[in-house]
Image (cartoon, grey):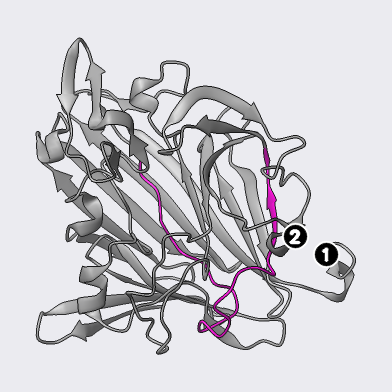
């Protein structure tokens, strides 16, 4: 099922909704290729929205927290807002202190993407495309980027990112979805969530979140989520870190799993990217209001941003995040939604 409706009549903004025969739906707008809602069942079969959702289009325009957008040209941070490629230094527009964050102040999150294709079936798809001119935010190369969202029969939202360029350029695309699994933002804290992350290390960072270049083992630290841990058992649980996933030859793997004990909803994140930024919404400051009438406050949602490592253009030891002419950027991520069953009760920790 695909449904196209007017979202903001005055501005001529459309909203596109994909759905399967189990009641799962996901809706999108062109600005930022943004997810406006993902509706899935809880353990009692009640279907509700599990991502942050703003009350109107004007709020999406004011969105400075990258809520549910596709950032680019380079998601996450580039240290010093500069990099050298093929002997030439490129100075970017800083928007995170001295650093570049998510492609700069006018990155892909602030652009209107074009709907290139709609496929209506029992697993409907929508493809958004954006053309980024050579020199936009001072990145080299004319770049055509796209993301195809698909709602599957298994209650998955799959994402396929592609891009081509006419000059070598850094590319790192992700979906900055903020998850609150309570349903329709009923519970504004994520403290009860049980988290598993399939990673033996993180990219160690300086105080400004720029990697040192060292891969730091998680064993014995508050970054060890190889077994499920409830966030409330970790003091403050302040996370904005890239986890080095236990990837295998670029295959799609289970990167993370999160369970909300109250709703019984489970989110599983699969990807073929090498890294994932786990972010606990530490900078959400109540300036935005959800469509459910509540302020969006600190640690009221969390993100699982599959990606290349931050500052990769300046770290030769990291997986290469440079796209060359004649090559195709080709990355996949899946958000899969399930519900807790009686057999799961002893699997998730209570403390």
From the top left corner, tell me how far across and down residue 108 is, in percent. 23, 51
Left or right: 285, with 236 as reference point: left
Gap in Å between the C-alphas at discs 1 and 2?
Answer: 7 Å
Q: Quadrant of the C terminus?
A: bottom right
Q: Residues within 10 Å of mark 2 (few under 14, many from 20)?
A: some
- Closer to the camera in the image, 68 or 236: 236
Left or right placement of residue 4 versus residue 140 in this view:
right
Residue 283 in the image, given as x and y percentages of width and height: 42, 60
Looking at the picture, how far across and down is residue 172, in whole percent? 35, 38
Task: Give the label on residue 141, or none.
Answer: none
Viewer-closest of 117 and 87 = 87
Viewer-closest of 67 and 150: 67
Pointer 1 and pointer 2: residues touching (CB < 8 Å)? yes
Q: Which residue is mark 2?
A: 233
* 196 drawn magenta: yes
Please say if 27 is above or below 252. below
In x, y percent, where is residue 262? 71, 80
In the rendered structure, which segment of residues is drawn in magenta?
172-199
Secondary structure state at the residue bearing disc 2? helix
Report crowding for label 1: few under 14, some 14 to 19, many 20 or more residues within 10 A (C-alpha): few
Up/down of 51 relative to 72, above or below:
below
Secondary structure type for disc 1: loop
Q: Which mark is residue 351?
A: 1
Question: Which residue is at 30% across, 46% downward?
Answer: 102
Q: What residue is rendered at 22% in x and 12% in y? A: 86
């Amino acid at each position: 099922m695909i449904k196209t409706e007017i979202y903001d009549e005055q501005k001529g903004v459309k909203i596109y909704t994909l759905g399967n025969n189990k009641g799962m739906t996901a809706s999108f707008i062109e600005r930022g290729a943004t997810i406006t809602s993902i509706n899935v069942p809880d353990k009692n079969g009640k279907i509700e929205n599990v991502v942050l959702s703003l009350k109107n289009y004007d709020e999406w325009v004011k969105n400075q927290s990258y809520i549910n957008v596709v950032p680019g040209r380079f998601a996450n941070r580039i240290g010093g807002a500069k990099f050298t490629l093929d002997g030439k230094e490129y100075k970017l527009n800083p928007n995170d202190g001295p650093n570049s964050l998510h492609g700069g102040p006018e990155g892909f999150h602030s652009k209107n993407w074009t709907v290139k294709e709609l496929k209506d079936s029992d697993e409907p798809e929508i493809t958004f495309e954006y053309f980024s001119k050579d020199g936009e935010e001072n990145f080299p190369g004319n770049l055509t980027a796209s993301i195809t969202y698909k709602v599957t029969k298994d209650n998955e939202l799959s994402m396929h990112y592609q891009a081509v360029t006419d000059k070598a350029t850094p590319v790192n695309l992700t979906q900055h979805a903020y998850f609150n699994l309570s349903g329709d933002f009923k519970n504004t804290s994520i403290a009860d969530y049980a988290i598993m992350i399939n990673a033996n290390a993180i990219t160690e960072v300086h105080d400004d979140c720029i990697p040192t270049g060292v891969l730091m083992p998680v064993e014995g630290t508050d970054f060890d989520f190889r077994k499920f841990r409830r966030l409330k058992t970790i003091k403050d649980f302040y996370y904005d870190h890239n986890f080095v996933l236990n990837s295998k030859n670029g295959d799609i793997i289970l990167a993370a799993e999160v369970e909300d004990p109250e709703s019984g909803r489970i989110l599983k994140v699969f990807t073929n990217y090498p890294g994932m930024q786990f972010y606990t919404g530490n900078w959400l400051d109540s300036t935005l209001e959800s469509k459910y009438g509540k302020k969006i406050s600190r640690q009221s949602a969390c993100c699982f941003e599959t990606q290349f490592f931050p500052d990769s253009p300046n770290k030769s030891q990291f997986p290469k995040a440079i796209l060359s002419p004649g090559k195709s950027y080709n990355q996949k991520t899946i958000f899969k939604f399930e519900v807790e069953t009686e057999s799961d009760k002893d699997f998730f920790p209570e403390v």
